[in-house]
Image (cartoon, rainbow, N blue to C red):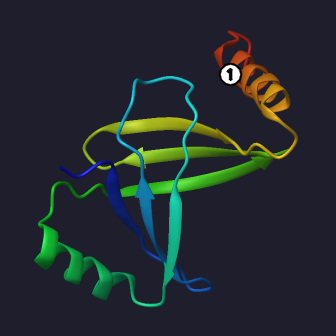
Amino acid sequence: MPKGRLKIAPGGASRDGELIGLPPAGPHGARTSEFQRLPTSDAAGTRRLLERMLGLRACVRKWREVWLYKNARIHLDTVEGLGRFIEIEVVVTEGMAQARRLMKELTRRWESPGRT
């Protein structure tokens, strides 16, 4: 039985695409996630091969704007047919305590009524 998900992140003009292995989806909200990335110079070809071999479960079309703050990546996503979302990823570079403090700081700022 498969565990987790695979996704293809197409590259842009200045970078290759990636095949990303993600753990099984968990509850919404803050959680720890370990993933593996494999660069590919042919994201479209990799997608066709995987689709032929494994089938396609879903295709998500989104536009992403990424902001960086300390060791966090803030994703502002517009997902076709679903709407707009924010995702915050804090990379553990200075220990879990620092990562949790930064996540708390960012979510508190996002949830505060006076934000612009």
Q: Residues within 10 Å of mark 1 (few under 14, many from 20)?
A: few
Residue 113's x, y, as percent?
A: 68, 9
Please determine whether, in this image, residue 15 is positioned above or below residue 70: below
Residue denoted by label 1: 107
Q: Where's the C terminus, which quadrant? A: top right
Q: Residue shown at 15%/68% (left/top)?
A: 54
Residue 58's x, y, as percent?
A: 19, 54
Please determine whether, in this image, residue 45 is positioned above or below residue 81: below
What element does badge 1 sit on?
Answer: helix
Instruction: Give the residue type at disc 1.
Output: Thr
Q: Is residue 105 left or right of residue 52?
A: right
Q: Is residue 106 left or right of residue 58?
A: right
| Rendered image quadrant of residue 30 | top right
Q: Residue shown at 65%/15% (left/top)?
A: 111
Q: Residue shown at 74%/12% (left/top)?
A: 114
Is 51 or 107 nearer to us in this picture? 51
Q: Residue shown at 36%/37% (left/top)?
A: 25
Residue 104's x, y, as percent?
A: 74, 20
